[in-house]
Image (tube, grey):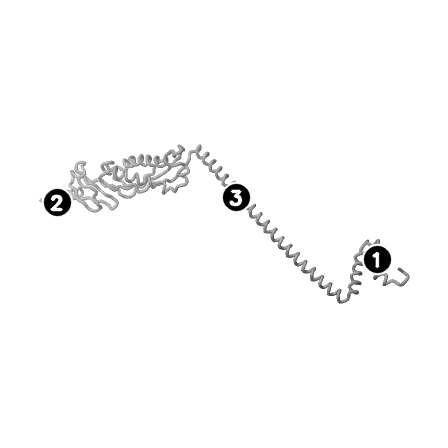
Amino acid sequence: MINNRSLLIVGGLAAVAWLASNSLYVVDETERAVKLRFGEIIEENIQPGLHVKVPITQTVRKFDTRVLTLDTDPSRYLTLEQKAVIVDSYVKWQVVNPTKYYEATSGDEMMAVRLIQPRVDESLRNEFGRLNLQQIIAERRDDLMTGPTEDLDALLRDELGVAILDVRVKRIDLPDDVSSAVYERMRSEREREAREWRAQGQEEAERIRANADRRRQVLLAQANERAETLRGEGDAEAAALYDQAYSQDPEFFAFWRSLQAYRDSFEGDRDMLVLDPSSDFFRYLKSAMPSGEE
């Protein structure tokens, strides 16, 4: 009796444990779920928490709703001018509609990746195909990916129930043959710009030099004019002084000027003069000599 009762209790507890484990389930904060009955969805977008299901007939599929990353393989795209670029990119995506996601992928993340990747590749191919190489190099990568991100998000929300949060370009490379041509063209453009800057600098230098020469000539002319004015004023003042001195003692002034003339005439080797002895030049010399020695 006791053994039978113990067995019944143990069996009952096991049945309860089995029933609880197959009837209760927990959806985590990072998940969303759908409830199925024989493969058909009967409850959508089950939120985090403890929930109940009917064992055997009902099953629950849970999906990770955190932001996931799809790192795509580098792809070769043609620009507007039919030049090739090699683009390495990645995609940030998230499950936002568990029902559509399950219907499109059966809840298989790898299946979702296989469906997302070709659409991303097509969108990037179209985006790079409408731009030339200069625009691709010059534009900011964030701005470059705005259009593809918005288009893919609208498309895949409807098709797969996933949101495309961001499409980013990690790297844009040029094939070796294109790189050489691009670098050569860039070098030529830089050399042309350098020549233009040098020509502008030379022109500016010539203009500055011409202005400096003109100002120099003006300053010299002004200085010469000022010098001539001062010299004239000095000569006039000297003449006035001479005149004043001469008027005070004309005889002494004449004598002093004669001495100056004698000194200048006989300076150095210039000691020969051809003059009339009766010339007024020798007036003071004759007056200084005794009578009869002229």
Specify which label sits upstream in the sequence, 3 or 2. 2
Crowd rating for badge 2 (residues with CA inside 10 Å; few <14, some 14–19, many 20+)? few
Q: Nearer the viewer, residue 278 or 191?
A: 278
**Residue 179: percent from the left, percent from the top?**
44, 35
Residue furthest out toward the left: 1
Residue drawn where x is 68% and y is 58% of the image: 232
Q: Nearer the viewer, residue 118 or 29?
A: 118
The residue pinned by badge 2 equals 9
Q: Secondary structure at mark 3?
A: helix
Viewer can see residue 52:
yes
The residue pinned by badge 1 equals 279
Direction from residue 138 to residue 3 in the image, left or right? left
Q: Secondary structure at mark 2?
A: helix
Q: CA distance from mark 1 to mark 2?
A: 171 Å
- Amino acid carrying mark 3 in the image: Gln
Crowd rating for badge 1 (residues with CA inside 10 Å; few <14, some 14–19, many 20+)? few
